[in-house]
Amino acid sequence: MPTHATAADELAAGLLLDTPTISPKFLYDALGSTLFEAICELPEYYPTRTEAGIFATHGAAMARVAGSGTTLIDLGAGNCAKAASLFPLLQPRQYVAVDISADFVTDALNRLQQRFPEIGMLALGVDFSRQLPLPDTVRAAQRLFFYPGSSIGNFAPDEALAFLQRVHGACGDDGAILIGIDLEKDHAVLDAAYDDALGVTGAFNLNILRHANALLGADFDVRQWRHEGFFNPAMSRVEMHLTARSGHTVRWPGGSRHFAEGERIHTENSYKYREADAVDLLARAGFTDAQVWTDPERWFAVIYARGAAA
Ligand code: TRP
């Protein structure tokens, strides 16, 4: 299966680590993406709706500090819905939708262009988590990097800093960032958000094993595994694991691994920040003049910060 060679190699290497790991990017096959949309509808999963509430309440204030005519660069645009909801307020001159999946984002952009013919639109299919190559077709002036959804929390803190430094490097002297960051809160709220009563989050996490079977040709038996999602206060992160219900061996072409009962595969971390630490992280990446908007319970923050001092 030559087209999957890289993914298969990466999956096999992760499974053979001392702490077996499957990269969270493999959560999002077609079923996984649908299950994640369902997660966003769950009463326990507060981040999506809390952030949307902050944009609804404070979008006009954000647009005032950002100014109109920006080059809006959406990092992880997906269906482009979050950015599009801000177009009437932000009135960007150009909208650049960046996503690892070029096809998906191109479809969304074509529909959006019909609704907003006055905004120049560009789709870029790149994995921006490693590097941020922006072609000349992206306007250099007034760049506003849009990074909602607390995706920053899925990086370890040192990776998050390196990522923000790269974004900062692409800001020029009049660029800025508008970023959504999930905040540390009552641990019971965090635990429930990542282990809901209906088991949708469990299904989402377990689905990664089906995807690994498809990509690697592994023989994971999903029924042999259970989902665990919980807040780890020492690391200030929610950890997602899959735990073996009994000892058994998983095989794939060219390899195998025995899992003892209770042994875990780590799938994702979701770091939660204190508000001051989020602002400090942006400052260490070179951003200045941070302005923070939150919800009444202070569960989530949307932060605007400039690439260079005003
Ligand atoms: N990026 C999401 C988050 O950190 C992903 C997510 C939500 C997730 N629930 C999950 C990942 C459960 C793995 C398992 O909030």
Image (spheres, rainbow, N blue to C red):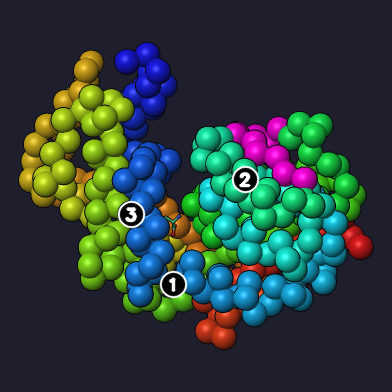
Mark 1 Cβ and ligand 1 under 8 Å apart: no
Query: In the drawing, does residue 227 fall left or right of residue 59?
Result: left
The residue tagged with tag 3: helix, strand or loop? helix
- Residue under pointer 1: 46
- What separation in Å lies between label 3 and label 2 (alpha carbons)? 23 Å
In the rendered image, residue 179 lying in the magenta stretch gets the answer no
Which residue is disc 3 drawn over?
Answer: 35
In this rendering, position of residue 256 left or right of residue 111: left
Ligand 1 within 8 Å of disc 3? The answer is no
Residue at 82% across, 72% down: 64
Q: Position of residue 210 (x, y in %)?
A: 24, 38
- Badge number at residue 109: 2
Residue at the (58%, 80%) spot, across then down:
295
Q: Residue at x 62, y 76 (%)?
A: 56
Query: In front: mark 1 or mark 2?
Result: 2
Residue 132 counted in the magenta span: yes
> In this view of the protein, which residue sits in the foreground, 107 or 283?
107
Query: Could you say whether the residue bearing mark 2 is in a helix, strand or loop?
Result: helix
